[in-house]
Amino acid sequence: MHHTLELKVLDSRFGDEWPLPAYATAASAGLDLRAAVEGPLTLAPGDAALVPSGLAVHIGDPTLCAVILPRSGLGHKHGIVLGNGTGLIDADYQGPLMISVWNRGREAFTIEPGDRIAQLVVLPIVRATLQVVDEFETSARGTGGFGHTGVR
Ligand SMILES: O=c1ccn([C@H]2C[C@H](O)[C@@H](COP(=O)(O)OP(=O)(O)OP(=O)(O)O)O2)c(=O)[nH]1
Ligand SMILES: [Mg+2]
């Protein structure tokens, strides 16, 4: 699937010091997002900060959304993940794209202006109509969950 994503550049360092987000390889799913901070930002262990990406996107199409995900290297090696777990960007959102950065690690971590700190993934969405029923048609799983099928 392909979608043309409208993008507003909010930080003039894009196009000059920093390239616009781009897919790193022909089959990459994520566009890396940069920290559009004014100066170095040090996150102590446990701290979170709302970091501007310097960009706004308007997805428009309600059958799409975008998610902000951690970068695996930063998350695994340095404990730099997202304060909101995953960021969900609605198709009708037109405001600045913000990144909640959380240091879940045991050491302080410094983010420099322009560092690629997270990634944006555009995804298809199914919007559901809720239908209230008294009983569900029986399924193989039924109400079993939370490990009820065991480990091995
Ligand atoms: O990491 C994120 C998550 C969300 N957003 C923006 C886009 C999204 O469409 C909007 C609302 O997000 P969400 O619905 O998750 O937050 P909320 O706390 O429910 O706010 P609202 O009441 O505005 O929906 O905030 C970001 O910029 N970054
Ligand atoms: Mg909401």
Image (cartoon, rainbow, N blue to C red):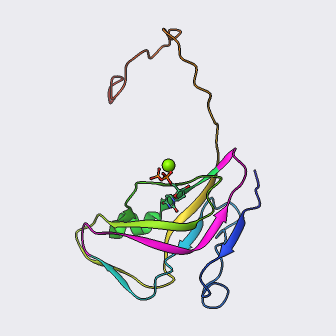
Residue 3: percent from left, percent from top: 76, 56
Is 114 on the left or on the right of 91, as rendered? left
Residue 20: percent from left, percent from top: 66, 78
Is 150 on the left or on the right of 20, as rendered? left
Where residue 51 sits, quadrant-wise, is bottom left
Instruction: Inspect the magenta stretch and tell me whether residue 58 lies in it.
Output: yes
What residue is drawn where x is 59% and y is 82%? 11
Query: Relative to 13, is 43 above or below?
Result: above
Residue 138: percent from left, percent from top: 50, 9
Q: Quadrant of the C terminus?
A: top left
User: Foreground: 93 or 146?
Assistant: 93
Instruction: Inspect the magenta stretch and tell me whether residue 74 lies in it.
Output: no
Number of numbered labels in the structure image: 0
What residue is drawn where x is 34% and y is 70%? 78
Is 28 on the left or on the right of 2, as rendered? left
Where residue 2 sits, quadrant-wise, is bottom right
User: Foreground: 3 or 11?
Assistant: 11
Residue 143: percent from left, percent from top: 39, 17
What residue is drawn where x is 77% and y is 61%? 4
The residue range painted magenta reads 44-64
Is 43 on the left or on the right of 135, as rendered? left
Where residue 59 sits, quadrant-wise, is bottom right
